[in-house]
Image (cartoon, helix red, strand yellow):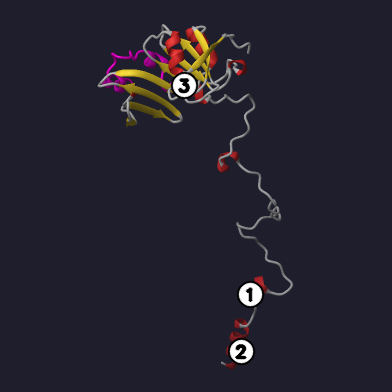
């Protein structure tokens, strides 16, 4: 009995085979790698899809529209020309351009805004009297659509046209007044039209008097 107890006690105190000193385990787990891991990069290469940055385009980027061409797209010239001063009603104007963003002032004005573009319509009791497009296209576009003006002038400033020393181009039969914030010798075909006004047909001399502008010789820009 004593001998059996001693043998049992000796078996219980034997160390496990895998933990004996000086021996290496005979197998590896599936999670362990046979070769050491590669050290991490100091800076990871960004993934364009993951970071939101797209690769630089290889071709020439498409130019964004200028404010002037954007305004011509938002307020189509055909719709503006369709307004007949003295005949087109407020309801017809809003059918073409939507509900006015502003209505007020004396004389009454309707104003329509699309981003940085603005269309102003002066009205009487219920009819449009005058249309003004702000920052609308370029001098080159104006000359291509309407041809050379009947007269050119330089403003001297008054309540009708506050800014002095700007160019005024008059199309009498079409009732168009174009204002460009530069003197005639500083104009190019890319010069922006500050104000494009549509009125009833007028006489040039009377319009020059109303705007306090002196007539000058019109020489189309060479560039």
State the image quarter where residue 54 is shown: top right
Horizontal and vertical percent position of residue 74? 42, 23
Q: Is residue 80 magenta?
A: yes
- Please provide the residue range marked out in magenta: 73-96
Mark whose residue sits in front, 2 or 3: 3
Dot 2: what SS?
helix
Residue 126 horizontal side relative to residue 221, left or right: left
Q: Earlier in the sequence, mark 1 or mark 2?
A: 2
Q: Earlier in the sequence, mark 1 or mark 3?
A: 1
Q: CA distance from mark 1 to mark 2?
A: 19 Å
Q: Earlier in the sequence, mark 2 or mark 3?
A: 2
State the image quarter where residue 90 is shown: top left
Query: Dot 1: within a 10 Å radius of its alpha carbon, few (fewer than 14), some, or many (20 or more) residues?
Result: few
Question: Label for residue 16?
Answer: 1
Dot 3: what SS?
strand
Give the residue at mark 2. 6
Mark whose residue sits in front, 1 or 2: 1
Residue 194 horizontal side relative to residue 13, left or right: left
Q: Is residue 221 above or below residue 57?
A: above
Q: CA distance from mark 1 to mark 3?
A: 96 Å
In front here: 166 or 47? Answer: 166
State the image quarter where residue 196 is shown: top left
Q: Is residue 219 magenta?
A: no
Label 2–label 3 contact, CB within 8 A:
no
Question: Label for residue 195?
Answer: 3
In front here: 122 or 212? Answer: 212
Question: Label for residue 152?
Answer: none
Locate the N terminus and report the quarter of the image it occupies: bottom right
């Amino acid at each position: 009995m004593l001998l059996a107890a001693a043998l049992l006690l000796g078996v219980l105190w034997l160390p496990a085979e895998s933990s004996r000193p000086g021996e290496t385990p005979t197998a590896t787990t599936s999670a362990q790698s046979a070769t050491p891991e590669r050290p991490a990069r100091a800076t990871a290469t960004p993934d364009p899809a993951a970071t939101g940055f797209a690769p630089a385009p290889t071709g020439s980027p498409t130019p964004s529209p200028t404010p002037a061409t954007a305004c011509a797209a938002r307020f189509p010239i055909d719709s503006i020309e369709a307004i007949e001063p003295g005949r087109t009603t407020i309801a017809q104007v809003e059918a073409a351009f939507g509900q006015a963003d502003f209505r007020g002032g004396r004389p009454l004005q309707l104003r329509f805004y699309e981003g940085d573009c603005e269309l102003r319509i002066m009205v009487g009791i219920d009819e449009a009297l005058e249309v003004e497009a702000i920052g609308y296209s370029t001098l080159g576009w104006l000359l291509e659509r309407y041809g050379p003006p009947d007269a050119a002038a330089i403003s001297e400033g008054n309540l009708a046209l506050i800014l002095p020393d700007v160019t005024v181009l008059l199309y009498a039969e079409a009732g168009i007044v174009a204002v460009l914030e530069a003197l005639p010798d500083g104009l190019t075909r890319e010069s922006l039209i500050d104000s494009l006004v549509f009125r009833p047909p007028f006489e040039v001399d009377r319009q020059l008097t109303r705007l306090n502008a002196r007539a000058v010789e019109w020489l189309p820009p060479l560039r």
